[in-house]
Amino acid sequence: MFLVPDFKGHDFFPHGTMLPFMKYKNLCVGLSIVMMLLSLGIIMVKGFNYGVDFKGGSLIEVRAKSGSADISAMREQLDALGVGEVQIQSFGSDADVLIRVEQQPGEEEAQQDAANKVLSTLGDKYEQRRIEVVGPAVSSELRTTGLIAVLASIAAIVLYVWFRFEWQFSAGVVIGLFHDVLVTAGIFSLFQLAFDLSIVAALLTILGYSVNDSVVVADRIRENLRKYKKMPLTELLNLSINETLSRTILTGVTTIAVLLALFFLGGDVIQNFTFAMLFGVLIGTYSSIFISAPLIDYLGIKRDWSDEPAKAGAGGAAVRP
């Protein structure tokens, strides 16, 4: 009979850890406001480097018939065609290549002609796998629906947090979400990284991650508001953040570990998506600690929730938590 050793978990952050997060709330909130304003200014001045999804064009997938694709030679050949911007990236294996050609002036025939030029220039060394043509009307509609998707997600999250918590929690969460999305979008505008539907998907995923982190902290804050009726609010917020710190850090680290593997090993096609997710996880963790919680301190919160069970037991109407 084998004896199973008694394994005990390891505390990354010892019980009783009290890092002074709220001591730096003014500095962090001020820094966040500056980052949001800078991001908004960069987006207004530089705009986005829209991909084929959002500005129209052709997407061509080809595969080398033998050996690996010579991307540098392909880029040199296609840049000389005079069809505007041509983006070339590895796709899947070393033999697969994804080519994006910008929208051509004229109707869909002009776009098809540009795709045919690309294929004829590549010659017999490559076989065509697929061609997709996105017209300007479709790309404009995709931009609009992508923006609506992000705004609708934020609105749904606000309603959820508002019904579950008090309005002060909702205000902190929504400002934190706008901060995460705006700063991430600002980074893409600053470095002119390709902005397509995959980045919209990344922004929506960032919203989900950020609100999940914020709700965990908010739950602990509400619990401690009932438990410590006399504790100053600033001290209570700091206690709540420290009590959830281990969960916040470990969740972020495991998520980042997976994203780093995707970033370095997943190929060029998903690299921008993975970068958006990496940055979003970092900025989302920051906002749940240094934006959502400090805003509750600035706005104030009621401290009489612990009396509600007694009122309900005495026949009084229970107040919404």
Image (tube, grey):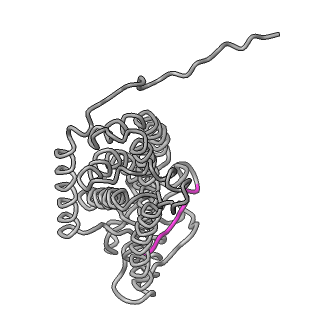
Q: Is residue 192 left or right of residue 9?
A: left
Q: Quadrant of residue 130?
A: bottom right
How many badges with numbers are in the image?
Answer: 0
- Residue at the front extreme of this rendering: 314
- Give the answer, above or below, for where 281 lies relative to 104: above
125 or 229: nearer the viewer: 229
- Give the answer, above or below, for where 154 lies relative to 237: below
Q: Kindly identify the residue that appears in the image at 41 percent across and 61 percent down.
A: 199
Q: Position of residue 39 (x, y in %)?
A: 22, 60
* Quadrant of the drawing holding the N terminus: top right
Predominant SS of the magenta segment? strand
Question: Is residue 229 in the magenta section?
Answer: no
Question: Can residue 195 be seen here?
Answer: yes
232 or 240: nearer the viewer: 232
Q: Kindly identify the residue that appears in the image at 39 percent across and 71 percent down.
A: 151
- Residue at the bottom extreme of this rendering: 107
Q: Position of residue 113 (x, y in %)?
A: 44, 81
Q: Kindly identify the residue that appears in the image at 53 percent across and 73 percent down.
A: 131
- Report the span colored magenta: 57-65
Question: Can residue 70 be seen here?
Answer: no
186 or 192: nearer the viewer: 186
Q: Kindly identify the residue that appears in the image at 50 percent across and 66 percent down.
A: 123
Q: Is residue 9 left or right of residue 31?
A: right
Q: Is residue 3 left or right of residue 9?
A: right
Q: Position of residue 89 (x, y in %)?
A: 43, 57
Q: Position of residue 269 (x, y in %)?
A: 46, 56
